[in-house]
Each structure stands twice: as structure tokens, then as C-alpha cells.
Image (cartoon, grey):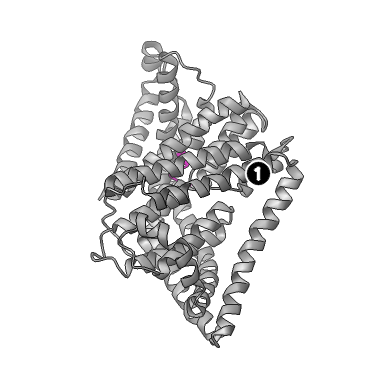
Amino acid sequence: MALNYIWIGFFLIGFAVALCRVIGYYFRHYFEQTFGWVFDKADLSVFSDIVNSTFTMAEASVNIAIYLIGVMTLWLGLMKIGEMGGAVNVLSRIVGPFFSKLFPELPKNHPAGGSMLMNFSANMLGLDNAATPLGLKAMHELQTINPSKDTASNSQIMFLVLNTSGLTLIPISVMALRAAEGAVNPSDIFLPILIATYFSTLAGLIVVSIYQRINLFQPIILTYLIGITAIIVGVMYYFNGLSQEQAGIISSLVGNFILFSIIIGFIVLALRRRINIYDSFIDGAKEGFEVAIKIIPFLVAMLVAIGVFRASGAMDIMVSSIGSVFGFLGFNTDFVPALPTALMKPLSGSGARGMMVEAMQTYGVDSFVGRLASTIQGSTETTFYTLAVYYGAVSIKNTRYTVTCGLIADFFGILAAIVVGYIFFY
């Protein structure tokens, strides 16, 4: 139901803003003399921009789905090998004690535990291409124990919010874009991103636990959280002592080595069980193709609405309004030019990436704004895109409080990114 209102809101707000821009142009002299608002001929093309954005985003949605067909076919085929060979059950047992507390509805040693673990691992290593199909696999497995098939279960909500909070150990893509823009040290945003994304994930975990009345002070949960925190601190300490070139090489090597080692482990375990590996892969690959096709309507709906909202100029108005409010309250507003990345991030990953690149090109890749925009880009995942894809794959219509929790996690991640940005770069 929340997505329904948000989707309608994107269109209605976009229409209202566009209409105001057109009216403002025809009465531009009055508005400029009375309020100081400036309108020009670009405002007359706003409805054309909006309509063009609907076609552009619809095409982008299908292109994403086509891309996902290959990726989903590959990774769900590999996951089927892991499932038949018993590897997924092994992973499930590793995280079983922890997941049994966070996901009390999940049966012991359920394969969804292994799929979720692999999804989280791929996200943490910056391997986005692998994370999505693994996450969709986990959603399908969680759906098998969902008593109400069109309503998100507690387990699905917890999984999706932790997914959208985007805990990232190695932000490869952000560092690569900074390097492409000529940053002196592209990896200087590594520690700030790690801190910001950690707070985002922690906020998501806490708020969902409050909704679901999960006690986070249980010894098992605390043990795992302390262990995860120790790993993050260790990674921070290690990479902080490396040069940009060393950090890039090692992060890429370690991430892809772990990923390919998992694939080999799946195959070896399947061989030990004398499983027909090729047939197992084909069975899983067929599922991947079906899931990718099923996602298309949900992608088109969400990305087109986001495109309308952005093309209307509503996003720009939000940014300038926020800047005015902070300026009126007496706060430093040097972070405001990086806000387009923050506001776009929950809506569109590619849009936020474009905003980040635009900020780096406009203000300088090594400027405060350029670095802050990069930190924000790596602080969370794309909430609405993830909701549309993951829930669309299992035909969930009632998302309950997922949007609320996901946006709270986004808020704390972005807030942490701004605070950390001032500490590290200002």
C-alpha cells in the first residue's frame, strides 16, 4: 500500500511542479518583481521533458531486465548446484544461530539462510552483479514459508531492509568512478563509506527489530554483531594503510577470489554427492529466466515514476528548500550541493551515480562536495528499486512497514555520511 501512495505521489507532485513552472513563465515579470523567482524558456519544455523521461525510463527498465536475464540465469543456475550439493545448507548452519534470532519465522537450516548470507557477502564485497540474483533467490525461498503470499512476511521485511541499507566493505564502483575523474587518491572515501554504511545497516536492524519486537541484546545476536564490527574495524585498519593502487588491486582480487571460490566449492560438493551438475544448473537457470521476465512491469512502474519526479524539477526544489532551511537555522550549508545524490539514492542507483559524477565534475573530484557526494553514494542501496525488484519477483503487493524502515536506514546512512564527510574532508 505504501508503494501505491508513493507511486501516485511522484506523478501528482511532478505534474503540479511542472504546471507551476509553466504558469510562472507566463507571469515571470510579476514573480520576479514580487518574490525574486526567475523563470525562463526552459520552463516551457518541462512537460516535454517529463514525457520524454517516461519513454527513456521505460526503455531503461527493459534494458535492466534484459541484463538481469543473463545474470539471473547464471547465478540461479549456480545456486541450484549449491543447493543440490549441500553447500547452501552448510552456509545456513554457519549463520543459523544468528538468523534464528533475527528471523524467528525461518525454520532451522532453511536454505534461505545460505542465500541471504551469500547476498549480504556479495553486497559487502561490492559485487553488485552477483548480489541481486542471490537476493532474489533468497526472496523466493522466504516466500515458500510466507503464510500470506501477497503480503510481506517479517523475515522478508528484515532481509530487504538489511539489503537496502547496503553494508559495503569494499566500494569498488565508487572508487573506480573517482579514479576515472582523476582523483589524487580515489580510495580516500573508503573509511567514510564504511562508517556511513555501517550506521545505515545498524539503523535498519534496530528499527525493524522494534517493529517486530526482537530483543537485540540477546547474547547470540550481540556476539555476532561484535564479531561483524571487529571484522569491519580490521578491514578499515588494513586498507587505511594501503595506497590507492594497492587498495584497488587487493579489494578486487579478494572479492572476486572469494566469489569464484564459492562457485568452485559448490561444484566440488556436488561432485562428492554425485549430482548431475549440468542438469542442476539448467534447472536453476530456467528459474532465473522466469524471474527476470516477471520483474519488468515492476521496474517500468517504479523507474518511470521516478523519472517524472526528477524531470519535473521537484528534486531541485527539494534540494534548494533543504538548503534554505539549514541556512535559516544557522547551520553550515556547504554540504547542500551534494544533496541531489542523497535524495536520488533511494530512488535510482544510476540517477544517484549521475548526480555524484556531476558533483565531482562541477566542484572538483577532490573537493569537499565531490568527496561527500561519493561517500553518500556508497552509504546505502537504492531502496525503491530494490523494493520493486525483490517484491515484484515474488508478487508481494502489501509491503507493510518496509518502506518506512528502509527510508529510516537511508536517512541515518546519509546523515552519517554528511557528519563523517565534515570530519574527514572539511
Amino acid type, label 1: Met
Q: Is residue 249 visible to the viewer in this orientation of the structure?
A: yes
Residue bearing the label numbered 1: 175
Quadrant in the picture for residue 67: bottom right
347 is within the stretch colored magenta:
yes
Image quarter of the C terminus: top right
- At horizontal 46% and vertical 50% (from top left) the residue drawn is 223
Q: Is residue 250 above or below residue 328?
A: below
Residue density around tag 1, few if under 14, some if 14–19, many if 20 or more, within 10 Å: many
The one of 377 and 27 positioned closer to us in this rendering: 377
Quadrant in the picture for residue 252: bottom right
- At horizontal 46% and vertical 61% (from top left) the residue drawn is 95
Q: Is residue 54 visible to the viewer in this orientation of the structure?
A: no
Residue 206 on image: x %, y %: 36, 43
Which residues are the magenta region? Answer: 344-348
Q: Secondary structure at mark 1?
A: helix
Residue 281 on image: x %, y %: 53, 79
